[in-house]
Image (cartoon, rainbow, N blue to C red):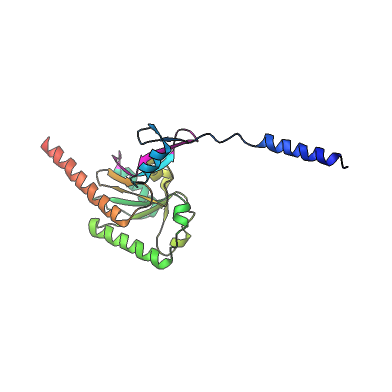
Amino acid sequence: MKNLLPTLLFAILMYSCSATPAATKEIKYFDEDDNQITKTKFDEIRATHKFLDVPGDSMNHKKLIFRVNRGNISSRPALQSLIEKAINEKLDDSKPLVIIFHPGEDECNSSRLTGQTFLRNRFRELEDGVNKIAQTKPIYVYKNDTGLRKYKGIVNWHKDPAGTIERLFFQNHYPCSSFVVISKEGHFISYFGEFYKTQVFQAIQNVANEECFQSENTLAN
């Protein structure tokens, strides 16, 4: 028995070593144009808060993306129809769609000390501002309802219809939550990750200005 014990310990040690996964590959870093950069440069750009980092083409790749995105959707009426069914409410097609998107619980949106009073005030200020600027109200959409319990009685969240909002605007999981503002013509501005209410207000104004600019160009032509 005394001779057997060292043999068993040696066998266990050898098995543990052989079962250890291969060393993690060195992480590679890329800028917003897919150019490989150093970690130092990556962290420096990330610290400006104008960018977020998302997974790249491989598991050991990290890529920077702009936090603000602009574009156009092919059919605002089709999107509005999906949203109306999801929230069981008719929307004014002359007003912008202001959508707050919750991706699911994460370290950013679960670790903060956010009591009911704080949340109620925060969303009241957001809604008052949106109504003052655009005479509409935000629509709250979630991909995953984890982490939404604390909003009960404050915000009415709705399931993303057929994953449409995520597919069109939020292809990655961005920390905390994100938002998108869509004009009546389908022009949009989206913002990835944690945001301030003033950024929502500014996006509404910017979308309206871009729409006016487009109209002026059309008339000029």
For this orientation, the residue located farthest to the bottom is: 117
For this orientation, the residue located farthest to the right is: 1
The residue drawn where x is 42% and y is 65% is: 153
Magenta-span inclusion, residue 166? no
Quarter of the figure with the N terminus = top right
Q: 178 or 3, which lies in front? A: 3
For this orientation, the residue located farthest to the top is: 35
Q: How many marks?
A: 0
Residue 188 horizontal side relative to residue 63, left or right: left
Residue 140's place in the image compared with 212, above or below, is below
Residue 11's place in the image compared with 80, above or below, is above
Where residue 186 sits, quadrant-wise, is top left
Q: Residue 15, can we see it?
A: yes
Q: Residue 79, how many percent across, how many down?
A: 34, 45
Q: Residue 91, how many percent across, how many down?
A: 30, 53
Q: Residue 84, how many percent across, how many down?
A: 35, 51
The residue drawn where x is 38% and y is 38% is: 41
Residue 147 horizontal side relative to residue 22, left or right: left
Q: 37 or 57, which lies in front? A: 37
Q: Residue 63, how many percent across, how many down?
A: 41, 37
Q: 75 or 165, which lies in front? A: 165
Magenta-span inclusion, residue 58? yes
The residue drawn where x is 43% and y is 36% is: 29
Quarter of the figure with the C terminus = top left
Q: Which residues are magenta?
A: 55-75
Residue 213's place in the image compared with 58, above or below, is below
Q: Residue 95, can we see it?
A: no
Where residue 115 sits, quadrant-wise, is bottom left
Residue 71 horizontal side relative to residue 21, left or right: left
Q: 194 or 26, which lies in front? A: 26
